[in-house]
Image (cartoon, rainbow, N blue to C red):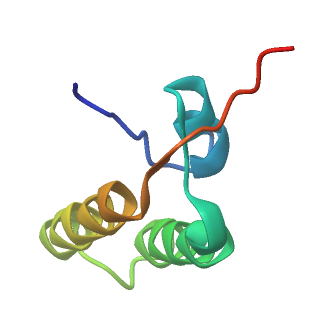
């Protein structure tokens, strides 16, 4: 199964994206959201050039995937 995350100022929060794909980020969700927001902000304001931004997003993507846990759905 492939899990995708979209990054950017207008993207849905990572936890929402994970939930829509049947997963949760668990305890890591707040940290990962802050990291993603920080990268986007630094890129928009010219502190991260395109190449470095792409590398950083690639690393963040790996952290997001490692943090994934199956969403526990209870059926009554």
Answer with the quarter of the image where residue 67 lies. bottom left
- Closest to the observer, 49 or 26: 26
- Closest to the observer, 74 or 5: 74
> Outermost residue toward the right?
76
> Would you say 58 lies left or right of 10 here?
left
Residue under the point 15% across and 70% down = 55
> Outermost residue toward the top?
76
Question: Vertically, is 37 above or below 48?
Answer: above
> Outermost residue toward the front?
76
> Would you say 2 lies left or right of 28 here?
left
Residue under the point 23% across and 28% down = 2
Do we see residue 71 in this rendering? yes
Residue under the point 38% across and 60% down = 64
Quadrant of the drawing holding the C terminus: top right
Quadrant of the drawing holding the N terminus: top left
The spot of residue 42 in percent (x, y) is: 47, 79
Question: Vertically, is 68 above or below 1?
Answer: below
The spot of residue 48 in percent (x, y) is: 31, 80
The spot of residue 45 in percent (x, y) is: 50, 75
Do we see residue 13 in this rendering? no
- Numbered label tally: 0
Question: Vertically, is 2 above or below 44?
Answer: above
Answer with the quarter of the image where residue 31 lies. bottom right
> Would you say 13 lies left or right of 43 here?
right
Residue under the point 63% across and 48% down = 15
Question: Vertically, is 42 above or below 15?
Answer: below
- Closest to the observer, 63 or 48: 63
């Amino acid at each position: 199964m492939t899990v995708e995350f979209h990054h950017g100022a207008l993207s849905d929060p990572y936890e929402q994206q994970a939930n829509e794909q049947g997963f949760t980020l668990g305890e890591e969700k707040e940290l990962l959201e802050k990291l993603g927001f920080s990268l986007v902000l630094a890129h928009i304001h010219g502190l991260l050039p395109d190449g470095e931004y792409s590398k950083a997003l690639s690393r963040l993507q790996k952290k997001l995937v490692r943090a994934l846990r199956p969403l526990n759905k209870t059926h009554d």
